[in-house]
Amino acid sequence: MATEPRTSPEVGGMGHSIKRKEDARFIRGQGKYVDDIQLPGMLYLDIVRSPYAHAKIKKIDASKATAIPGVLAVITGDLLKQYNLHWMPTLMSDTQMVLPVEKVMHQGQEVAAVLATDKYIAADGVQAVEVDYEPLPVVIDPFKALEKGAPVLRTDKPDKKDNHIFHWEAGDKEGTDKVFQQAEVKIKQDIYLPRINVASIETCGCVAHFDKAQGKLTVWMTTQAPHAIRTVFALVAGHVGLSEEKIRVISPDIGGGFGGKVPVYPGYVIAVAASVLTGKPVKWIEDRIENLQAASFARDYHITAELAGKKDGTLQALRFKTIADHGYTDAAANPSKFPAGLFHICTGSYDFQKAFVEVDAAYTNKPPGGIAYRCSFRVTEAVHAIERMVDIYAHQLGMDPADLRKKNFITKFPYKSPFGFEYDSGNYAGALDLAMKKIGYAELRKEQAEKRKRGELMGIGISSFTEIVGAGPSKHYDILGLKMFDSCELRVHPTGKAIARFGTKSQGQGHETTYAQIIAEELGIPAEHVAVEEGDTDTAPYGLGTYASRSTPVAGAAGAMAARKVREKAKKIAAHLLEVSEDDLVWEPGKFYVKGSPSKVKTIQEIAFAAYTNHPQGMEAGLEAVNYYDPPNLTFPFGSYICVVDIDRGTGQVKIRRFVAVDDCGNIINPMIVDGQIHGGLTMGLAPAMYEEINYDADGNIQGGSLMDYLVPTSMETPKWETDKTCTPSPHHPLGAKGVGESATVGAPAAIANAVVDALWHLGVRHIDIPITPPKVWAVLKEKGVAE
Amino acid sequence: MAKQKIRVTVNGIAHEAEVEPRMLLVHFIREVLSLTGTHIGCDTTTCGACTLLLDEKPIKSCTAFAVMADGREIMTVEGLEKDGKLDPVQDGFHQEHGLQCGFCTPGMMMTSYALLKKNPSPSEEDIRWAISGNLCRCTGYVNIVKSVQYASQKAAH
């Protein structure tokens, strides 16, 4: 269902599929990404990385490197230690090495950095740095890491006697245990979501430029959260003279973010330090292999999931126990109070009486992280587990998975979940019914039964997910103490055109277009005449950035509220111009007119002009407003996806025949962009479901460290996605919108996995961990005696 | 390292430069000629962000040396627009929302341009096969296919 536009196509407010403004530069090759920045006298930084997963650094000999003409310096941990910059805090208040002084903790870790006049010379320097390592015992398995007697990895923490990072729990343990004790049906399944990397096509990097004369640092960097980064820099490097008003972070065009550009990576800090020390601009751009081997990972959750319920299919209680592998430091990007993110959305779309979830996190000799992969703080982990479990429950009872879902869907909103979330709105059966109708569910089940008689393997999988996005209300949500509001500063110019600046940063979402549409919707100024800027901390208002689908729910709301403030002032000016009382004025997009006399009218353009040329005495001139929006609640987009697969008994290959995605993200700003977001999100759901995985051998060697091994789906593997919508507005968002960028990534993997298991259940297959690869499926077919 | 002189025509303009033999073509295009529309996304000839046309054939310029282009003709994304007029491929990507972050877009468009030169009316399967050496993380390829179809139809009229 489409959102009915209230404005004309010329104005292009909400609901119009207007073409994107940002395309003009991108289709001409004129985008400005960080690696496109060239400054006079710029130096290049390249990084020496560890071949070992855990080793003592006995000696770093840089003499051969510094002897190379053009190599200016080799930066080591010892040098940074002089400035107390060799360690830095993570977003989860753990600590991470910028450069090591004693030992390395994962393969690919930064060991030293070469500064040179040319990138090829810097690479030569990296080859020439000689490091003497003494290998130490490697801990890769998080379960073993938590065993008594395991080598303690964080020897830098004097009080640390084990590898346990945190224990976190939520819900009613006793109440849940009690329901389990008395339940008619109990199921239990281990579910693993492996390590993956967002692999945005642009890797991470920065250009740091410290202007010694002015004492000002400018950093162009691949960051989804420029303002928070500026504050982090000021807090971490204040003692060496970097004061926040003299730090400017610019997030230029970003080639995909997906969560991977939220953290602060050592490379950024080394480049900044190198620029401050030399007074020259310094560029650091990681290559793809460095990106896959050392940038923040996502997932790596080992979940033991249990459900309890009745024989008639009524679900009663849920109990999840999880071991989280965080690598050598907890560098997750979660709101501070939630070390496991929003994993407790795991009751999903279903009405459970009781639930309990606990997560224990472990240090291992792997790269740090725990970021999202296009999802809102561990929501994919939660959705995958609950949607797999609901399917197992249905199959075990011999019920149709669609029927079991419908029997247990939450139907009354707002709904308070057992973990305390207040779901804003939903129509779960509506979305599932539409998906079933669109795909022809009943006919597919018939076809499946017939095929099964012939020994053909066909499966149908459903995922009816509930997302939780738009973090978040300041009472509960902060990052390093910074409350998770977001902002808009709106100025209307004398000729009735406008500029709006936001605290977020698009990485492809199309903010320059959709934010302009929000202003157009609220003020009637055509979207084409609303310029949108973000990403420059010297000009944009402070905000927490773009991730966790928070741009529309939080910054978009700020845009609407700022526009409404402008409208309030515009009304006063209109009343002055028309010589009537404000109460006599009626607003319709783009103009105020006198009640009962539509010909007595002032357009927003006329009012804007008057704001600078003929404003009422006693009123400030100008027409502008700022809003810092603190959302009253999160938003809860949802949807139902149905996937149909055919499995080749000869090869184990799973072919996705059809995939129907029905999404509900509330009111829609730009349907074209929403569809694009869903297509991309689905493909990033397909990727971990069937292709992507980063794992390690027992010595800590990465097994998927280049795009030759880490299989990002191409156009050939990617199905022809079929999409549709229902529309259930958020009651608390000023535009009724909910956010959509990540729904599909969250919802899709379970639909695919459920379809595969559905095809094999009759053979005694109960679960397959993602990625569901042909060798994995073929091994199952062979074990069950049906491989050809 | 000793430098070597090369002569290359890029987007119709003749260039002469001294380059190290090890300099990658993509670095020559981006840094020597400052044509930064051609991007770098991987080190393994996988992602295709660096695709440009060498003597009308699409190649991945991260795995070619600049010296290999000596005496040859190159076309990059900056060469698509002619006399202020967008190529149908550029128009198609805009009209059909075939791009989001824009990073894969130049390579994707160059591959599509080369496909349409060879096959003006490709089927969906032809398009998917042609662009399968170009990775996109944002669009799920649906709208890229539509963009190429749009360009194909527009060029036919």
Image (cartoon, rainbow, N blue to C red):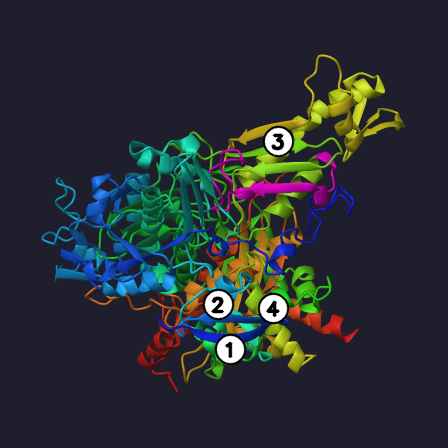
Which quadrant would the C terminus of chain A be assigned to in this image?
bottom left
Mark closer to the chain start, 4 or 1? 1
Q: Which residue is mark 4?
A: B109
- The region drawn magenta spans A523-552
- Relative to B92, say whether B53 is above or below: below
Q: Which residue is mark 1?
A: B69
Q: State how far apart marks 4 and 2 are (Cα).
A: 20 Å
Kind of residue at badge 4? Met
Is there CB contact under 8 Å for labels 3 and 4? no
Say which chain tag 4 marks: B
Give above or below for B67 relative to A606. below
Q: Is residue A418 above or below residue A34?
A: above
Using the image, name the chain to which the residue with label 3 belongs: A
Name the residue carrying label 3: A561
- Secondary structure of the residue carrying numbered label 4: helix
Q: Residue A533: percent from the left, percent from the top?
A: 59, 41
> Is there one chain holding both mark 1 and mark 3?
no
Cα separation between marks 1 and 3: 55 Å
